[in-house]
Amino acid sequence: MTKKMIAIALALVGALSLSACQTQEQQTGTLVGGAVGAGTGALIGSAVSGGSAGGAIAGGVIGGVGGALVGNAVTRPRHCARHGYDVYGNRICVAWYN
């Protein structure tokens, strides 16, 4: 059981590394997709390989990468339609469109 947890943790770390340098919405989609893909892939990999840790790790990595790619592709960034200013004079977006 601990080998499966290590495999899932490694897959999640791999998915987190894929979510850098994007907008906040895309980071969330990538992270969720990677986490779901890694967990599902680890379970499927473990089941297919007869419970071996190698199968769980491989399934977790493959599922994590695939899930992160799908989560990133599905999440479209929002664009600012109207700008405003906060109390400190910083320009912020107050209305969005897709």
Image (cartoon, rainbow, N blue to C red):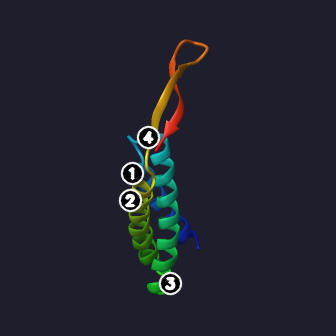
Asked which secondary structure carries label 1, the reply is: loop
Mark 4 / mark 2, whichever is N-terminal: 4
Residue type at tag 3:
Ala
State the separation of the CA atoms marked 3 and 1.
26 Å
- The answer to which of 46 and 38 lies nearer the viewer is 38
Residue displayed at 43% across by 57% down: 74
Mark 4 / mark 1, whichever is N-terminal: 1
Q: Are marks 3 and 2 in contact (CB under 8 Å)?
A: no
Q: Position of residue 64 (x, y in %)?
A: 43, 63
Residue 97 appears anywhere in the view: yes
State the separation of the CA atoms marked 3 and 2.
24 Å
- The answer to which of 78 and 48 lies nearer the viewer is 78
Residue 69 marker? 2
Mark 4 / mark 3, whichever is N-terminal: 4
Q: Is 71 above or below relative to 92?
A: below
Q: Position of residue 18 (x, y in %)?
A: 39, 51
- Name the residue that disc number 4 marks: 23
- Name the residue that disc number 1 marks: 18
State the separation of the CA atoms marked 4 and 3.
36 Å
Residue type at tag 2:
Leu
